[in-house]
Image: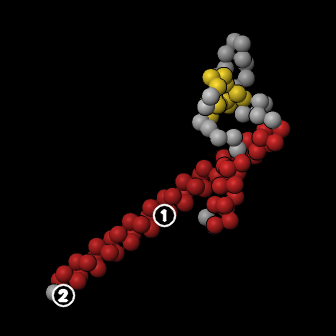
Amino acid sequence: MTNEELQAIKARCDAATPGPWIQTPFTHNNPYMSIRLRRQSDPRLYDVMRDMGWGKNRDNSIFIAHSRQDIPALLAHVEAQAARIKALEMRIQKESEERRMRV
């Protein structure tokens, strides 16, 4: 993953309405699934795609639309970084053991 890709994901995340977001289930009164959030000082639920104002609705829409590819890309990046860290740890351990044997 390039730095530009990471920065684009970060920008989408920063532009979206802060969470936590919740998914509300289908009900008799609400036949549509929606994504909602609670504001800190307000117990009411707000629909992130309808109640935030046009600019935030657009930002939230972009964030949601990209999440399907952003999350797998981020997970792959994290896994690759974890593998690199593990390889470096093993290399350090091996070099440390070799140094001890020379002494």
Q: Are marks 2 and 1 in contact (CB under 8 Å)?
A: no
Residue type, label 1: Gln
At label 1, counting other C-alpha atoms closer than 10 Å, the crowd grade (few under 14, some 14-19, many 20 or more) is: few
Q: Secondary structure at mark 2?
A: helix
**Which of the 4 image quadrants contains residue 55?**
top right
Residue 11: percent from left, percent from top = 69, 55
Q: Is residue 47 above or below residue 19?
A: above
Q: Is residue 10 above or below residue 84?
A: above
Q: Is residue 19 visible?
A: yes
Answer left or right for 13 relative to 58. Answer: left
Q: Which residue is mark 1?
A: 81
Answer left or right for 50 relative to 45. Answer: right
Residue 86: percent from left, percent from top = 38, 65
The residue drawn where x is 69% and y is 40% is 17
Q: Earlier in the sequence, mark 2 or mark 1?
A: 1
Looking at the image, which residue sits at the far top?
Answer: 28
Q: Secondary structure at mark 1?
A: helix
The residue drawn where x is 64% and y is 60% is 6
At label 2, counting other C-alpha atoms closer than 10 Å, the crowd grade (few under 14, some 14-19, many 20 or more) is: few
Residue 5: percent from left, percent from top = 67, 62
Answer left or right for 45 relative to 87. Answer: right
Answer left or right for 40 relative to 28. Answer: left
Q: Which residue is mark 2?
A: 102
**Which of the 4 image quadrants contains residue 97?**
bottom left
3D distance between C-alphas at marks 2 and 1:
32 Å
The residue drawn where x is 67% and y is 50% is 14
Residue 65: percent from left, percent from top = 73, 44
The residue drawn where x is 39% and y is 70% is 87
Looking at the image, which residue sits at the far right?
Answer: 54
